[in-house]
Image (spheres, rainbow, N blue to C red):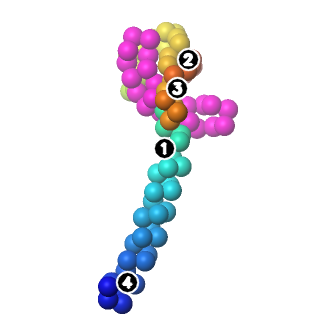
Amino acid sequence: MSEAASSIAAPTAEFGNLFRRAIARASASVVGLTSPRGGATSGTVWTDEGVIVTSHRGTSGRRQHENPWKLTGPDQLARDVELIG
């Protein structure tokens, strides 16, 4: 590898490693939500207390009082959750 190519490859590899770590960190916060009637959307864990943010579109048309919704996290375990807003 030429010196010029080597000087370009090092920052590119470093950027790739930073990008991979950012994706791994963010993906740990992404969850799937399924309504009792089978509708599905995704969300992001927003707080350490377990508040999950999702789009209104992902939950509209589903009755909010129809609980429990199912949450599937990165560990692939399904948990019952309540839609509150």
Residue at image point 51% right, 56% down = 21
Name the disc covering residue 27, or none. 1
Residue at image point 47% right, 63% down = 17
Name the disc covering residue 80, or none. 2
Segment tinted magenta in the rendering: 32-54
- Residue 53 visible in image: no
Give the position of the N terminus as an image quadrant.
bottom left
Closer to us: 56 or 14? 14
Mark 3 Cα shell of 10 Å, populated few (<14), some (14-19), many (≥20): few
Snapshot quadrant of residue 51: top right
**Label 4 – label 1 distance at C-alpha:** 32 Å
Left or right of 13 on screen, residue 81: right
Closer to us: 34 or 3? 3
Give the position of the C terminus as an image quadrant.
top right
Snapshot quadrant of residue 84: top right
Which amino acid type corresponds to the residue marked 3 in the rendered image?
Answer: Leu
**If you read the primary sequence from the N terminus, does the residue marked by circle 4 or circle 2 appear first?**
4
Which amino acid type corresponds to the residue marked 1 in the rendered image?
Answer: Ser
Name the disc covering residue 77, or none. 3
Closer to us: 76 or 43? 76
Residue under numbered circle 4: 6
Q: Are marks 4 and 3 in contact (CB under 8 Å)?
A: no
Which amino acid type corresponds to the residue marked 4 in the rendered image?
Answer: Ser
Which amino acid type corresponds to the residue marked 2 in the rendered image?
Answer: Asp
Left or right of 64 on screen, residue 57: left
